[in-house]
Image (cartoon, rainbow, N blue to C red):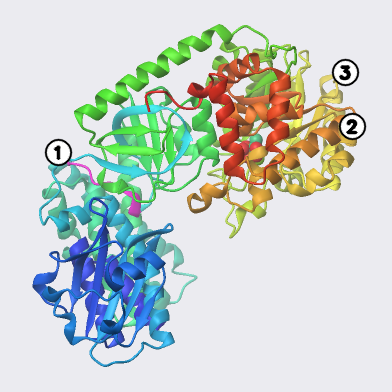
Amino acid sequence: MLDKLRKIVQDVDSAPNFAAALTTMVQSVRETMGTEVCSVYLVDDKTNRYILMASGGLNEDAVGNVSLAWNEGLVGLCGAREEPINLDDASAHPKYHYLPETGEENFNSFLGVPIMHRRKVLGVLVVQQRAKRKFDESEEAFLVTLSAQLSGVVAHAKAIGAFDSLRVSSSPRANQTRIFHGISGASGIALGRAIVMYPPADIDSVPDRVAEDIDAEIGQMRRAIEAVREDIRALDRKMAGSLMAEERALFDAYLRMLDDNALVTEIEDRIRAGNWAQGALREVIEDHMQAFAAMEDAYLRERMADVRDIGLRILAHLQKQEDAGLRVFPDHSILIGEEITTAMLVETPLDRIGGIVTVLGAANSHMAIVARALGIPTVLGVSDLPVTSLDDTEMIVDAYQGRIYVQPSRQLRTRYKDIIKEEQQLVAGLEAYRDVPAETPDGHRVALYVNTGLMADVVRAKDRGAEGVGLYRTEIPFMLRERFPGEEEQRSIYRQQLEAFMPRPVTMRTLDIGGDKDLPYFPIEEDNPALGWRGIRITLDHPEIFMVQVRAMLKAAIGLDNLQILLPMISSVFEVEEALHLIHRAMMEVQEEEGVPITMPRIGVMVEVPATVLQIADMAQLVDFVSVGSNDLTQYMLAVDRNNPRVADIYTPYHPSVLRALQMVVEEVHRIGKPVGICGEMAGDPGTAILLMAMGFDSLSMSASNLLKIRKVICTVPYFQARGLLEQVMQVDNAAVIKSLVEFELEDLGLIDLIRPSKK
Ligand code: PEP
Ligand code: MG
């Protein structure tokens, strides 16, 4: 059964369009289950009715022409109950609604299962038979499984408007606005044209793009193919001594594929039809892979991997040629992609980037944090975005609401330009908070620090009166290089940070890679990276990396003495002790080498793991300060991957357990007389910042783009009022209710504009 299921899903996936996908779906289900009818009803969002969209077995004329109200008939019942309806005699059921156009009176048994995507009913998949019989358990399970697998195809088709075009049986108008939904990663609005970003040699993400010069594209393709031929011949020669002739036969097969005119001619035909070389290659490789995938013979099916490999090799050569010609980023470019990593982002000309949109990722993924620091409106987790077809398309990114408008209408553009103006006024209004201390009207003082990583952050932070750096993410300069930076290289990078803020403190976190933070030259492949080898676990396993970094920090601080060192992902006392031991050793070494006394920097522990919350008093005894990394702490407290858009709506720092954990950390650390700050994204959010201040955090550290907003919040909200709010929310057991209570308070205080513009 599993094979049959896989085959249906593959057939549907490889259908050329949505109409063909639906027809394939109903025919395949009918054949596989041996039923007389299989039909798909889909909900039309405009009328809220179920429309018969495809059927094998009912009258063909009825398709597209009959519909049921949302609660009408057995189809409506199945959708309303969100569960299968399995009947041996459909017409005897009180909800049965006869549709004469379909000819369904001939069929007695009925099994309908809802098509669900993200808790929403998209439609109902139905099988029917003449015989009066209940479908057995395995048939029901089969249809449920299939429906769950196909729901993604339906959701995608609806999102890109394919459903509308099918319903009205005409193509969508070329200038029709399309809307996509995701999660806000960094608030703001952007208007611009899309640039598709894709990792090198990832053939699936290559966008379609109009070939400007067809001959030049064909020339590039021929050169790339010749280069691959040469690579393969070289590989064959190299392996001659170590592989047997049969094993080397693969190389011959590759060369034959490249010499086979079919592949090359097909690619050139696609280029002549107007797609650029990389897009044409993707199209042809996809077609060939689909043809192999459809083959019954398992051996032939496996040749798919070879076709893909050849495609990747050609693509790598094409991309080399593209890099040589350097990509152009116009002003206000909107970067879009399946996934855009921090490393990909920081390599772009950042001053030209207006917005970012990705299919994967969630609000607290690392790239989102960097985008926030840079003030670039970002929407993530737009699972339905047809990335490859959007290159150079005009779009609006509404990162307040997590919405993307593709080919926006004139009215939309005007409306959003007004919102941008309003934002600019808001920013201008915040200028007044540039030089005032962050102190509540009733005299409670909180230190406001900045989170940095790039040099651009430093300039913006100083401009906005940061009182120091609460978190310097050292992995960011590491990402900008092609190998680990050496000690002298690191020393000079760190010196710039320390000098820029002197005499204010700069908290440098030791290398925090792993999880979603990969270095291109130190890839870590793990099934479960969030629970794997990351942060201090890596650097304690590689003391050579840790020591070079700490020595570079200590040398950089000579004569400045404003360095603090922060240890990430601590989960045991032993790790703190080991790290302290290495830092002491580095200090002795540097002192001896430099011949000057070295001041021991203040050392801090990050609280990111629930185990550390419960043991914080033990750990705080060993160090000088504590800093809470609430992004990871929320992830681990709630067991919710901070990068996974599917669970993004349950990742919330307003969760009562997270708030209780934070309160506990503050109380414990203060009990032993040490300072405690917070450097996760909560610190830069006006709503959560009020609660953190009320809890007694000594410092809040945030991206430069939030500094003025949070200073305004602190200068506006009396401490006693924040305490009152905290007391109230700590009695509540529900995150959504807590969030609303806080937002009501912001509303009352006239601060709601800080989280969403009033024009929305
Ligand atoms: C955190 O986890 O809250 C934190 C500040 O670290 P990062 O976001 O870099 O993992
Ligand atoms: Mg972290």
Q: Which residues are magenta?
A: 203-212
Name which of mark 3 and mark 2 comes first in the sequence: 3
Q: Contact (CB < 8 A) between labels 3 and 2?
A: no
On the picture, is 84 further left or further right than 679? left
Name which of mark 2 and mark 1 comes first in the sequence: 1
Write the residue at 86% across / 28% down.
674
Write down which quadrant ligand 2 falls in.
top right
Q: Residues within 10 Å of mark 2 (few under 14, many from 20)?
A: few
Residue that carries the numbered disc 1 in the rendered image: 213
Residue 50 in which image quadrant: bottom left
Q: Specify the quadrant that holds the N terminus.
A: bottom left
Q: Is residue 738 above or below residue 53?
A: above
Q: Specify the quadrant that holds the C terminus.
A: top left
> Which numbered disc, 2 or 1, marks the residue closer to the eye?
2
Labelled disc at residue 671:
2
CA–CA distance between discs 2 and 1?
Answer: 71 Å
Q: Contact (CB < 8 A) between labels 1 and 3?
A: no
Q: Amino acid at mark 2?
A: Arg
Instruction: Look at the magenta stretch and give its main secondary structure.
Output: loop
Q: Amino acid at mark 3?
A: Pro
One can see residue 100 in this view: yes
CA–CA distance between discs 3 and 2?
Answer: 33 Å
Is residue 669 in the magenta section? no
Residue that carries the numbered disc 3 in the rendered image: 597
On the picture, is 216 further left or further right than 538? left
Which type of secondary structure does the marked residue at label 3 adopt? loop
Q: Amino acid at mark 1?
A: Asp
Which type of secondary structure does the marked residue at label 2 adopt? helix
Q: Is residue 667 above or below residue 374?
A: below
One can see residue 484 in this view: no
